[in-house]
Image (tube, helix red, strand yellow):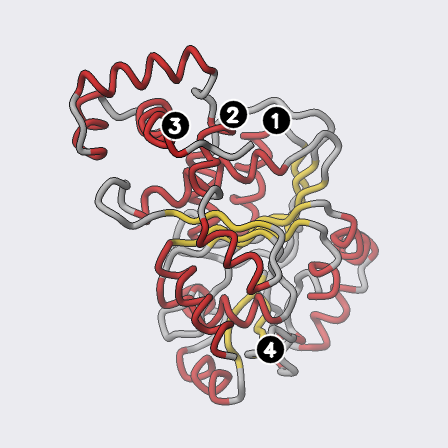
Amino acid sequence: MAIRPAEQIIHKAAWLYYTHGLRQDEVAKHLNISRASVAMYLRKARETGIVTISTSSQLFTDDVLARETEDALGLDAVWIVPEDRTALDAAAEMPTVAAAVFIEQVKKGDRIGVAWGRTVYHIADVMPYVDLQDVTVVQLCGNLGAPYNYRPDQCTTEIARRLNAEGINLYAPLVLSSEELAAALMDEPVIREQLASISSCNLALYSVGGIEADSHLVKCGALTPAEMAALGRAGAAGVIAGRLIDAGGLLMDCAYNRRCISADLASIRAIEKRMMVVEEAQKFEPLVAAIKGGLVSHLVVTTSMARRLLERWTAA
């Protein structure tokens, strides 16, 4: 049910107070209202049952821009994190909104595919603990010796822990030293079966990576800056679950991809709900590529990113 305009302020106050843990005076400052008004709105929120993450996340989907973006891009659902003066910083707000949206999508018995990266790890870090039944969380790609706390296995394990679900890690490197070695490892029964089962997932949670010199793949040593630059000149536009895609969202035909241990894009496209979360402005072109490639069905983005996407699609 859509939020009535008169109730928007109540939902905003409840979201800031109960989800982000702001004090009443801080909520009042963010919303530019009096503290007495905040107390009144929070009382109404309790009386009407608004004080749940599920209800409050409607704030980010009950929006004309969200509907326009869905229609133009052919997506199932869009949630928009605002960047106006009444909102928290979008970079801080994004993981909380995405975690709320993600939990709403999970159903009993679901199998969830999880990729890696800073965005996914931050979502896992703020995700509330819930007790879901018969849910399995599987890793979409192999591991890298990341110099930070968001390796694929860590993202998978933490999300499984937050959902009280079974976690299945992929115990293989993301990138092998040769195409022959990668092919042999992918032919191992346990690896082959795990990768083949990804298409049976109901939901995927991931972001899209860029191809800049300081991208994850470069920082983790999978590619040198020179190699990444050369791949960019050859047509690489972004990274999905460790694999390089071109501007149309298709798998790049390159030696790097043939050395990867990761879900193939056909398996990912077969997942019903492909939830992508993107906050950084520099990921616009990679996101466009992912959408064109059918790798996104559910999207969480900022207001400015949604407007850029609309402009791109309406100009086409």
> Which residue is label 2 attached to?
129
Query: Horizontal placement of 105 versus 227: left or right?
Result: right
Viewer-nearest of labels 4 and 2? 4
The residues bearing labels 4 and 2 have C-alpha atoms spaced at a distance of 37 Å
Q: Circle 1 sits in a helix, a strand or a loop, which is it?
A: loop
Q: Residue at x 39, y 74 (%)?
A: 212
The reply to whether discs 4 and 3 touch (Cβ–Cβ < 8 Å) is no
> Which residue is label 1 attached to?
164
Kind of residue indicated by mark 1: Asn
The residues bearing labels 4 and 3 have C-alpha atoms spaced at a distance of 41 Å
The residues bearing labels 3 and 2 have C-alpha atoms spaced at a distance of 28 Å
Viewer-nearest of labels 3 and 2? 3
Viewer-nearest of labels 1 and 4? 4
Q: Circle 3 sits in a helix, a strand or a loop, which is it?
A: helix
Q: Position of residue 151 (x, y in %)?
A: 50, 51
Q: Which mark identifies residue 230?
A: none
Kind of residue indicated by mark 3: Glu
Q: Which mark identifies residue 7?
A: 3
The residues bearing labels 1 and 3 have C-alpha atoms spaced at a distance of 33 Å
Q: Residue at x 18, y 28 (%)?
A: 33
